[in-house]
Amino acid sequence: MSLSAASVMTRNVVTVQPDDSVMQVAQVLSAHKISAAPVCDRSGKLLGMVSEGDLMRPFGTQRSLARDWWLHLLAEGTELAPAFLDYVRADTHRARDVMVAPVITASEATSLSDLADLLAQHRIKRVPVLRDGKVVGIVSRADLVRTLATKPRVFADPA
């Protein structure tokens, strides 16, 4: 018995748009209890993927230190207005700024073994499934583990 991506994928995929703010993306992920979402344009074309880890990148300590250094240089020893500092520190990042692209993808016909290989080789947790360049599903590691637990023969080598 050979299963494909179409047989295990989640079909109602939650997506975000490239101009969504980091806060909006975080709210979508939280509301749907997911850890990542495809970034798609209005026509549904896949542009990238954004995950919880991608959302954290703009807030890291290294970025903050670099921003503070530049602000100090701009001020040339004088105090910068608190309103200006608040404006510069405010998050203005959008999904397009933090998403990963290009994205590793699969088709509906991709075998589960090939999906497992994609996930392992690229060290990713999910693969969007495309039809004509548009997202029609997503397969996560959890989907493959669930299938392995219920249908272990699917991953067995044909002998």
Image: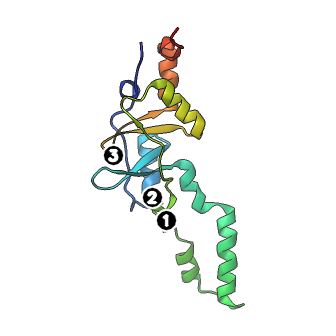
Give the amino acid at mark 2.
Ala
Image location (x, y in percent) of residue 107: 38, 35
Label ID, residue 93:
1
Instruction: From the image, state whether disc 3 or disc 1 is nearer to you.
Output: 3
Rendered residue at 47%/47% (across/down): 103
- Label 1, label 2: how far apart the Cα atoms are: 7 Å
- Label 2, label 3: how far apart the Cα atoms are: 19 Å
* Residue furthest to the top: 159
Rendered residue at 51%/67% (across/down): 91
Give the amino acid at mark 3.
Gly
Residue that mark 2 sits on: 95
Instruction: From the image, state whether disc 2 or disc 3 is nearer to you.
Output: 3
Is residue 79 visible from the viewing direction of this image?
no
Quadrant of the snapshot with the N terminus? top left
Rendered residue at 37%/47% (across/down): 15
Near-viewer residue (147 or 71) = 147
- Is disc 1 in contact with disc 2, using a CB cutoff of under 8 Å? no
Is residue 93 visible from the viewing direction of this image?
yes
Q: Earlier in the sequence, mark 2 or mark 3?
A: 2
Image location (x, y in percent) of residue 21: 43, 61
Helix, strand or loop under label 1: loop
Helix, strand or loop under label 2: helix
Residue that mark 3 sits on: 133
- Label 3, label 1: how far apart the Cα atoms are: 26 Å
Vertically, is 69 above or below 134?
below
* Residue furthest to the front: 159
Give the amino acid at mark 1.
His
Image location (x, y in percent) of residue 22: 47, 59
Near-viewer residue (68 or 2) = 2
Image location (x, y in percent) of residue 141: 52, 31
